[in-house]
Each structure stands twice: as structure tokens, then as C-alpha cells.
Amino acid sequence: AAGQGPLTSLDISQNLAIAAAPLVSPSGVTSGEAALHHILEACASLTALDVSHTGFCILELSPVLAAHGATLLELRLEGCSIAADVGPHGERRVSKLAAALGQCEHLQVLELGELGIVPALRRPLQVLLQRCAPTLRCLRGTLPLATLELGLSSLFSTGTCRDGGAKQLVDLEVGLTGLGCACQKQRYHGVVEVLNANIGTLQRLRLRAHFGDHWSAALVQAVRGARLIELALEGCGLGPNTARYLHGVMSHNEAWPLQHLALSYNPLGEAVLPLLAAFRTRQRLQKLGLRDCELPAAAAGSALGRLIVALPALIDLDLQENSSLGEVGIRAFLEAALCEWGRQEQSIRSRALGSIALPGHVHLHGSVASEAEASVPKCLGRFKLAL
């Protein structure tokens, strides 16, 4: 449009259907994908590019990345693909992509989706991470453990320092592969070091990998001094050791100002009880995930009942697939909530379960036998109980 500056940000995400559609055009463009590529090629220097969920082959984007890499600050590639058979010139095409990605050394936001687990792309993406690590603020995707550690760490495996490394990550959401190999155990130290180097800026941490109790505890300890508003360690193998470290953080006066906490798919069992007591001081907590955590019946039910009254901002509590709770645990949950509510002052009652309180949901599917569901009320104050 007249009077406006050049286009610097382009978002053509979620256009998978359009990319796959045939097209009749006077200019000779015969498909939606070709039309989208034409748009990309017509752009001047971009600072933000989002081609996620378009189905583009990443190898076809080499010219675009080479053209805009020097100015790009945000790059979103989730949902892009790579041909299973890259053909006789595949190695050359990957080399061109690697060279193009090498131009993107000022990225602040990088979303990779599942591209990181494609063997042909592991080395190019590792080099990309090493180049943009000093400026990177947000990284999302699935990566081999070694790629993350070698790409973001400022330490060699020998302990000596190297140039670069991530120092100002705000948002880190990664699923990690290759954790089962004994040779990868040394990489865990690198991940801990990466987290430690970013505690001054890190606010959102979501990890998907089975670290086991020992290394999960080390990761929690590494980010103890961060100001996390979101933490997700689902299916990471948390146990009593990690629970103790989490309790230590939550009990501290300068604990994380958490809004979202997801600990689902970890066999916490009895170790969750001190945590539930500590959570009562997290007044900003909005979402808490404890799905399939082997919660002990009566003790956990009572602690959770007291918890929902104590947290006025809580709007989503996921207790699904905790068959150990059962009818006994749910009854303890209801009774404890009502008793706790009755002990509160009138002003606190209104905020906890009263009419002016925020509406919320407690998800209980799979935590009570079907024959006992009829005895569970549909609502508890401001909370809908979803069975």
C-alpha cells in the first residue's frame, strides 16, 4: 500500500490445503504451493518468516533462506517436510540448505517442529544453533540430545570454554531423542549447563524426554534461580529425588512465580504430598497437570481438595488417569475442599469457590470407576468436575 514501508514480516502458516490445491493462473503458476513460493521470492528483506504447517519441503526453501537469512530474527518451520528419497542430487541439496541456514545467525525465535530428528538435517541444524545461540530467545522443536547440547552449550565436553553459546533464552520447548545410549549420558551435563547459563532470562521451560529421577533433579536445581512462569516436565521420569528438589524451590521465599506447571506422566506417588502442600503458596498458579502420577488415594485427595480452595487463580487441574485415587480419593477431595472453604473468611470464600470466583475445571476421567461416577457431583463451587 502507498505510504507504507516494505514488508518485513510474512506469515503464510496453516496453508497446507492451499499448497496442495491445483491452480489455474495466467502467470503460469499451476499449484497453490508454487503460488506461495512466488510470494516468498517476491519479498524483500524479511525479519520474520512463518511457513509452519504448509507442507513445504525444507530443501526447496534454500534460496529463500539464503536471501533473507542475514536479516531474519524469527523463523518458524514446524510442519515442513523433507522427501524420504531426496534423489541423486540429495547431498548437494542438503549442502545448499546448510549454507542457507548458515546465513541465519541473528535469529531470536526458531521453531523447528520434527525437522531436528531427520538424519540428513542434524548437522546443518547443529551449525545453525551454534551460529544463532548468542541471540536466541525462543527455541521449540524435537532434537537429538547431542544436537541441543553441541548447538547451545558454551562448553566443550572437556570443560573448556568455546565462543558463543545461548545466554538469553526466554522460552525453551524441546523434545529430546537419543537419551537411552550410554554414550549420551555425558550430554546431560551439557543440558544442565545450558539451563544454568540462562537462569537470568528463562521464563518458560518445557522438556519432553525421559531423563530419570537423578537428572531431572539436576535440571530442577539448574533453574532454581530462574523466574519461571511455566514449567513442564511431563514424562521425564520424575521421582522422589526430583520431588524433594521441587519442594525446596516451592518452599523458598523467592520461588518461581509459576502460572502453569505440568508434571503429568511421572510416577510421583507419595512423593507428591509435600509438593501439594507447597503449591498452596503459589497464588498465581492457573494450570496444574498431574495426570497419571500414581497419586495416593485419601492423602492426595485431601491435599488436592485443600489446594483448589487455596489457589484463587487456578482454572485447570488435570487429575486424569490416576486410578489409584478411586472413589476413596475423590470423596476425600470433595470433603477436604468443603472443610477448607468453611474455615476461610467470607472474603476469601468468595474468591475460592463463590460466585465471583473464576470458573475452573477439574479433569477426573480415568481416576474413578465408572460405577462410582454417579456419586460424583458435576460441580464443586466454581469448578466443573469432568469425568
Image: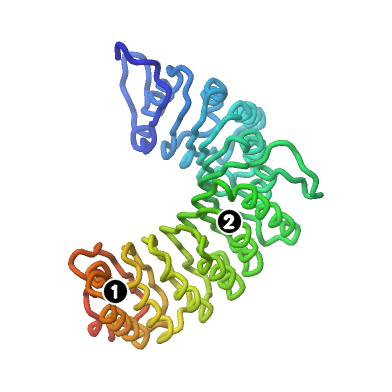
Q: Position of residue 26 (x, y in %)?
A: 31, 14
Disc nearest the viewer among 2 and 1: 2
Q: Secondary structure at mark 2?
A: loop
Q: Position of residue 170 (x, y in %)?
A: 52, 45
Residue 164: name its quadrant. top right
Task: Identify the image's colour scheme: rainbow, by chain, secondary structure or one colour.
Answer: rainbow
> Image quadrant for the C terminus?
bottom left
Distance of label 2 from label 1 (alpha carbons): 38 Å
Mark nearer the N terminus (2 vs 1): 2
Q: Residue type at mark 1: give it.
A: Leu
Q: Return the residue nearer the eye: 271 or 36.
A: 271
Left or right: residue 233 versus residue 197 is: left
Is 55 placed left or right of 183 in the picture?
left
In the image, taking residue 7 as reference, residue 347 lies left or right, namely left
Name which residue lies at 43% across and 85% down. 299
In the rendered view of the protein, which quadrant contains the N terminus? top left
Residue sitting farthest toward the top? 2
Residue 266, x across and y down, in percent: 52, 70
Crowding near pointer 2: few (<14 within 10 Å), some, many (20+)?
Answer: some
- Crowd around label 1: few <14 · some 14–19 · many ≥20 (10 Å): some
Residue 191 visible? The answer is yes
CB-based contact (under 8 Å), mark 2 and mark 1: no
Which residue lies under the disc numbered 2? 225
User: Between 124 and 202, which is closer to the camera in this rendering?
Assistant: 202
Q: Amino acid at mark 2?
A: Gly
Indicate the position of residue 256 as horizontal and vertical percent values: 49, 59
Reading the image, the residue beneath label 1 is 387
**Secondary structure found at label 1:** loop
In depth, the one of 120 and 245 nearer the eye is 245
In this rendering, does residue 123 appear at all? Answer: no
